[in-house]
Image (spheres, rainbow, N blue to C red):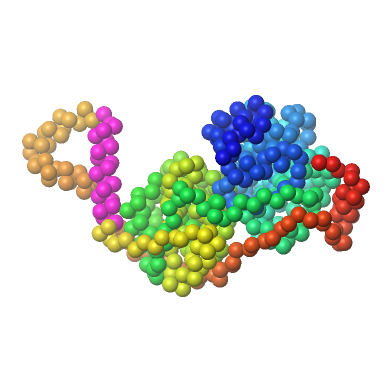
Amino acid sequence: MTTFNELGLSQPVARSISNMGFEEATPIQEQTIPLAMDGRDLIGQAHTGTGKTAAFGIPLVERFAINPGYIQGIVITPTRELAVQVAEELNRIGQFKGIRTLPIYGGQDINRQINALRKNPQIIVGTPGRLMDHMRRKTVRLHQVKMVVLDEADEMLNMGFIEDIEAILQETPEERQTLLFSATIPRPIQALAQRFMLNPEVVRINVKEVTVSNTEQYYLELQEKQKFDVLCRLLDIQSPSSAIIFGRTKRRVDELYEALNKRGYSAEGIHGDLTQAKRDSVLRQFKEGTVEVLAATDVAARGLDISGVTHVYNFDIPQDPDSYVHRIGRTGRLGKPGQAVTFVTPREISLLRIIESTAKRKITRIPAPTINEAIIGQQRLAVEKLLRVVEEEDTVQYKRLAEDLLEKTDSVALLSAALKMLTKEPDLTPVQLTEEAPLKMKKARNAKFEQRGYRRENNGPRGVNRRRDREQGKRSR
């Protein structure tokens, strides 16, 4: 494994990376950073959780001047959450060099963003719609941009943003550098690369490499109507300190977190219909530990990079292998252990097999836990809490009270009562969830994208100009 010291980083950037706690580069970072630093266009095929933000963030920060007075780089992301997350990481990378990054996205006051843009950040990270809004207002000008990054390009394709991206790229200089990162490379993404990129290097990190070894993967086969009770039992047995539960639809997420709260769990939900203020509030509570369980849809979870997630529960099996990898990548990070549990109905077993085949990994089947096992799990947790207080807390002021109680009550009976009070016994409050019919699995797109001399007759003026420049040797690497 390559260390960051071996990548030839400048002192300010090396210091930032060290402060972030990074020592060894991930495979995507090791392969893409030298290429990007050399000015090459590149396509990185990698999933969330592989370290791709630093893979493009380090070259962005390294190649930019400190006070140019204009925007030097843009990163386009599919969601608001990812825009904020990427901007936060880029600001950490650029903190000692003085490179500032500003996120711009819908749902936030645009005048506030305009005021922030007047401070001349070197990099902006934006969602396509809001970025185009600023371009129309001429509060964002891209005529001097040196680097463009398209992050999670296939997700932007799925969300219908490709035409917006093309319009944005048309406004950037001909001689910019373009970096594209995507979990898969379907035909429309290939066409986008053909039109707007120059002989890109292709770096692939396959699915097997990103199903992290620190994450234990299990599945349970059960009927749809059994899912919620089994989920509650697992929560009682495993006692996750921070868990994400994935549901297939917004309705499912709403019903899940409301039902969990009815049964005494600290839960919230996040999906695309929430206001930005509500999304920010939910994420803040989850990060701070006020909320221990977060129910989420796949789209809403894009860009969530919250450390300390111990468990992922796929309440609904994901619709494709890529989504599975993305989901379980929320846990088992930074060398810490994690668990991923997938609920599978009998009709969905074939979908599970496709995931296993694509990931080249067998997912272990476990039996559904019983109510008695859930009670034992909570009793064990109560004992652990009690012992932890004995070992770590100052209990001197309670000793006299304890002695008085022991004079009147048998010690075993007293301790039994204390454990009973500490034990969260299973809550059997009736809960009704709307059944979600399983979706047809989309097979993993094994896109073959090889470097070749791009020839495209209908590229329009921009494509013709870039091809002509190549033929005349005007752009050297």
Quadrant position of residue 411: top left
Instruction: Classify residue 174 as left or right of residue 312.
Output: right
Task: In the rendered view, tell whether residue 345 sits above or below residue 239.
Answer: below
Instruction: Classify residue 398 as left or right of residue 191.
Output: left
- Residue 238 point in image, percent of width and height: 35, 51
Quadrant of the drawing holding the C terminus: top right
Residue shown at the point (78%, 46%) measured from the top left: 135
- Residue sitting at the far front: 1
Q: Which residues are magenta?
A: 374-394
Q: Is residue 183 visible?
A: yes
Instruction: Classify residue 425 as left or right of residue 86.
Output: left
Q: Is residue 432 visible?
A: no
Instruction: Classify residue 313 as left or right of residue 59.
Output: left
Given residues 449 and 302, the one toward you in this image is: 449
Instruction: Decide whether residue 132 is among the magenta residues.
Output: no
Given residues 151 and 211, the one toward you in this image is: 211
Quadrant of the drawing holding the N terminus: top right
Task: In the rendered view, tell whether residue 137 sits above or below residue 406.
Answer: below
Residue shown at the point (82%, 57%) measured from the top left: 454
- Residue 247 point in image, percent of width and height: 49, 60
Q: Is the magenta region chiefly helix, strand or loop?
A: helix
Residue shown at the point (78%, 30%) measured from the top left: 68
- Residue 37 point in image, percent of width and height: 72, 38
- Residue 320 point in image, percent of width and height: 56, 63
For the image, the number of numbered tags is: 0
Task: In the rendered view, tell whether residue 206 sits above or below residue 28.
Answer: below
